[in-house]
Image: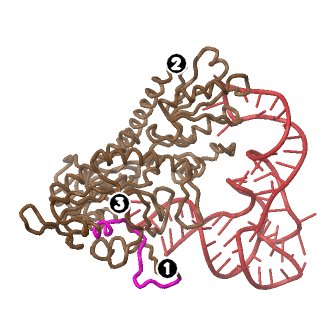
Chain colours: A brown, B red
Amino acid sequence: MAQQDKKLVEAITPMDEDFAQWYTDIVKKAELIDYSSVRGCCVLRPYSYAIWENMQKILDGMFKETGHQNVYMPMFIPESLLQKEKDHVEGFAPEVAWVTEGGGKKLEERLCVRPTSETLFCEHYKNIVHSYRDLPKLYNQWCSVVRWEKTTRPFLRTMEFLWQEGHTIHETSEEAVAETERMLNVYARFYEEFLAIPVLKGRKTEKEKFAGAVATYCIEAMMHDGKALQAGTSHYFGDGFAHAFDIQFQGRDNTPQYPFQTSWGMTTRTIGAIIMTHGDDSGLLLPPAVAPVQVMVIPVAQHKAGVLEEARRVREKIGAVCRADIDESDNSPGWKFAEHEMRGVPLRLELGPRDIEKGQCVLVRRDTREKAIVPLDALETEIPRLLGAIHDEMFRRAKENRERRTFEARTLEELIRLAETESGYIKAMWCGDTACEEALKEKAGVTSRCIPFEQEHLCDTCVCCGKPAKHLVYWGKAY
RNA sequence: CGAGGCGUAGCUCAGUUUGGUAGAGUGCCUGGUUUGGGACCAGGAUGCCGCAGGUUCAAGUCCUGUCGCCUCGACCA
């Protein structure tokens, strides 16, 4: 690895002083991204791309397990195709990029660079779905999409971002609803079991739902500073797109029928969620399941005879149970310790002459800084155990932060006061009217994050208007 | 898109008020000594001062424009 600025760590803004600045310091200094000359478009450097590849591998496996197949759709959408579904085009038109010229000639019909691919999938489904025997189709694609954002932040909002978008089509609405829920659960499991980020599962309000959807289910994560992050969405489309695109199939009863559809997506924003959930003043802390390097071997006094050789042997050996790397640079050990802590490597393995003599090494956890002297022949069991323990501790801390920052409001005054003085979720009852949702945004600066599946009953009336309450809603400020 | 801030060496920044030879720290390169929490010595290289105009004998510095980045708001994954 290239030599780094020695003052890297000192240069990171303390997170509680200025969380936004801390975040931008981290993404640059941990070599996750570089800015490019195109506004709002970031270079994903090897370290962040490796995280993305690990996430892809896990998620893709989960998609395959649930019977999905990968496909690839074109990146261009003709204007006429985009416009077929009214709500959809209204939602996306303001932020699409248009190609108006090609091969030196003005195009007869302009093409938009996909902001999402529902319309292309619909066009394709119309071609290939003719009978109930053709259903369901459970498709997914990994690609990038473009949305012409006004303001951008690395990972959280960039004009081009990487994602996966699942698009499925079913014979019945029951089946499509079940698919929507099933994939939301896949996302939730991925966040909690692999990224150590606890999530709330629920539904978006009419105001917040996806353009063209009947219902949008979501998982919401909470960042260290108490702001919410929409971590993944799963949409149920009903047969709305099928009508708009005239997709029909011959049913079991020999009548023409419209199929039911879903879509669901997760993006590179998730890397931002990892940073903002687990990071601390020393830098990143990566969940072991997606950390490009899970154990960094650091030879101590590596110039001494046999040290480097033994360190390489150990690295080779533990490579069987984890993703291991070795830092052979001629930086001092102290420098390496700080460097790999900043980059969020979950476990450090120190190996020096004294250890080699005794057939042991020192393992240091990034989350607790706890040091343990471990016999070399116990590494193959001890490393997986510690990686698991780190994951559990990360999850526990993230959940603790969320619980500490979750509040309840029974009156408007209470909600406004909480929104002013605290940063986090505010649970409050809601009547279901968009007018009240907009009023809360106006008066308290909060938006509805999600209507949780696990409902509670705080009181009988809407926190805003006093009419009978329909749902408990989590309110908050979001990224 | 509104408000604010910033563009000078790889990085962090000083220099701009009051125009007068381009600076520091750190990193980088070479050689040597070091190595269990950010080591040290000696030598060396590095700049379209974001870009374009203008004012001036003279512009990093003043004026006009422009591009980009960051933060906060409004909008969105």
Which residue occupies the foreground of this view, A279 or A94? A94
Give the answer, above or below, for where A424 lies relative to A161: above
Q: Quadrant of the N terminus of chain A?
A: top right
- The type of residue carrying mark 2 is Asp
- Residue A312 shows in this picture: yes
Question: Alpha-carbon distance for marks 1 and 2?
Answer: 63 Å
Assess whether mark 1 and mark 3 are in contact (beta carbons under 8 angstroms): no
Q: Position of residue B45 (x, y in %)?
A: 85, 54
Q: Chain of mark 2?
A: A
Residue corresponding to mark 1: A102
Residue corresponding to mark 2: A377
Q: Quadrant of the C terminus of chain A?
A: bottom left
Dots 3 and 1 on the same chain? yes
Using the rendered view, name the quadrant where residue A444 is placed.
Answer: bottom left
Residue corresponding to mark 3: A444
Question: Alpha-carbon distance for marks 2 and 3?
Answer: 58 Å
SS for callout 2: helix
- The type of residue carrying mark 1 is Gly
At horizontal 57% and vertical 35% (from top left) the residue drawn is A325
10 Å crowding of disc 3: few (<14), some (14-19), many (20+): many
SS for callout 3: helix
A98 on left or right of A85? right
- Figure disc tally: 3
Q: Which residues are magenta?
A: A104-123
Q: Chain of mark 1?
A: A
At horizontal 52% and vertical 65% (from top left) the residue drawn is A40
